[in-house]
Image (cartoon, coloured by chain):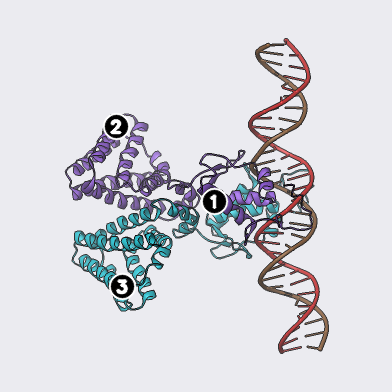
Chain colours: A cyan, B purple, C red, D brown
DNA sequence: CTGATTATTTGGTACGACCAAATAATATTG
DNA sequence: CAATATTATTTGGTCGTACCAAATAATCAG
């Protein structure tokens, strides 16, 4: 199809098929969305160059760029500065990226960090209760391994941090619901910078590890109340440290 | 200031003040962001027309439009088809709007709705436990009123639905953490259409109300285990209905 | 073959123009 | 004069061309 359209009309493809009701960009977005979801465009693949897409879809570069921006804001493609947009099949983790912009504002509001951390405490307490009641043998093993790794890293600040995160991550995995790991990623992403700037006192690691161990033992003993209590104590201590770091700067 | 700049340079405001490092659109976004957060641009107010902003910021319409699109994708402004962009000070509820695009895809994936509903069950169980242990007198009152409203609406399908949602909403409010009501809004927004299309059997309302009453009584008796059990039963029944509606279409 | 020079590609930006729909302003008519 | 029809004006959406800057590819000089 030549589609050598004249410059008379501003509707670029009067020959076009479907009933593109609204804006041209919306139409193009839905087209590409469809091709992503149908698997025609696979994850990791990249979209054509903007100048190619404008002939493909018979639209101006303006529209193409707007469409790509919309897809990016939906998390369906990743538009890096100088490269072709990369297709990202939506998953639960992508949510974190999409939210990043607005959450950064919310965190700077009054009690922003506190609200998020309170939510984390609330969730993790519920998670350990669930774990104490329903953790499988495999879950227990995973927990035990994570705990051991945490113990071994007790003198290495960076490593301890990552094993700490990993230990908590196991709790988020137990349910098998993929939403929870994504939530965990969100918490770590948005709270990490606050944790990082905490003063590095060695006894902190000792204290954290002991708490992890206590939580683990409670789960092992199938004691949800004890697990809850230990986790609450652990996380509230953590919060006090974060808060202290904040206020004293 | 006339700023009748020549067409020689493509940098529109060489006179410009700050160190606009990256893309022009990014700079403009951060400018407006600042004015929103500082209160200079109040919530509900609308931005100038695009053609005004381009002279205000000394940038082309292309950039202005891109900046507005970026702000919209961050949930800081609401850009309706034919009107000026409306400033929206970011709050926890806006998150729902920002996520809407991607979540609709996730819900259509394998187990998408189930995962979301499982999360809801998990959260609400934790909430009723918390309520049973810590609900204040005011919380109990609010719960009682919501329960009564629910009872009164038992023969009106639409009204029952809204009072049902309202009853659960009270649970999300108890903590005082503004994140929870936002989460509740998210659940209702994304699960509502599934609920709506459920067959309208009158005995369903009876059943739901009875469950609400049981949960309320457990909270009143400060019995977290009982509250949890009743809530779990209630929500799993609800899930089975949703699932049934799905599979049989 | 290596290193320097020169296209080519590609996203970012700028203008200027036109459309379509809505609104405001004005003119026309009963 | 009021009601209606007509004509600007405003405003977001789209188009097309042109240029920049950085990166990559291709080519040429030594």
Q: Nearer the viewer, mark 1 or mark 3?
A: 1
* Residues packed near mark 2 inside 10 Å, few (<14), some (14 to 19) or many (20 plus): some
Residue hosting label 2: B149
Q: Relative to A196, is A74 above or below? A: above
Residue hosting label 1: B34
In-front residue for pair B192/B9: B9
Asked if disc 3 and disc 2 are in contact, CB closer than 8 Å, the reply is no
The quadrant the C terminus of chain B occupies is top left
SS assignment at label 3: helix
Distance, label 1 to label 3, CA atoms, is: 39 Å
SS assignment at label 1: helix
Distance, label 3 to label 2, CA atoms, is: 51 Å
SS assignment at label 2: helix
Residue hosting label 3: A205
Q: Image point 21% across, 68% down: which residue?
A: A217
In-front residue for pair C5/B12: B12
Q: Position of residue A160 (x, y in %)?
A: 35, 74
Q: Earlier in the sequence, mark 2 or mark 1?
A: 1
Q: Position of residue A246 (x, y in %)?
A: 39, 60
Question: Label 1 lies in what chain?
Answer: B
Q: Relative to B93, is C8 above or below? A: below
Is residue B47 visible in this depiction of the protein?
A: yes
Is residue A30 visible in this depiction of the protein?
A: no
Question: Label 3 lies in what chain?
Answer: A
Please state if B48 lies on the left or on the right of B245 as rendered.
right
């Amino acid at each position: 199809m030549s589609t050598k359209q004249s410059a008379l009309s501003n509707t670029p493809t009067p020959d076009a098929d479907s009933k593109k009701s609204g804006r041209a960009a919306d139409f193009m977005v839905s087209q590409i969305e469809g091709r992503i979801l149908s698997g025609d465009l696979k994850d990791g693949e990249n979209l054509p160059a903007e100048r190619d897409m404008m002939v493909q879809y018979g639209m101006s570069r303006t529209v193409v760029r707007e469409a790509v921006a919309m897809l990016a804001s939906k998390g369906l493609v990743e538009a890096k500065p100088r490269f072709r947009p990369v297709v990202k099949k939506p998953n639960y983790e992508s949510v974190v990226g999409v939210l990043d912009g607005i959450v950064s504002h919310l965190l700077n509001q009054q009690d922003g960090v506190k609200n998020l951390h309170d939510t984390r405490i609330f969730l993790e307490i519920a998670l350990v209760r669930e774990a104490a009641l329903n953790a499988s043998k495999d879950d227990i093993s995973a927990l035990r391994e994570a705990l051991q790794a945490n113990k071994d890293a007790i003198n290495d600040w960076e490593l301890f941090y990552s094993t700490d995160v990993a230990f908590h991550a196991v709790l988020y995995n137990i349910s098998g619901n993929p939403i929870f790991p994504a939530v965990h990623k969100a918490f770590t992403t948005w709270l990490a910078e606050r944790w990082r700037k905490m003063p590095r006192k060695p006894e902190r690691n000792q204290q954290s590890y002991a708490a992890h161990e206590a939580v683990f033992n409670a789960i092992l003993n199938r004691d949800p109340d004890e697990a809850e209590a230990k986790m609450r104590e652990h996380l509230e201590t953590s919060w006090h440290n974060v808060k202290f770091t904040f206020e004293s700067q």
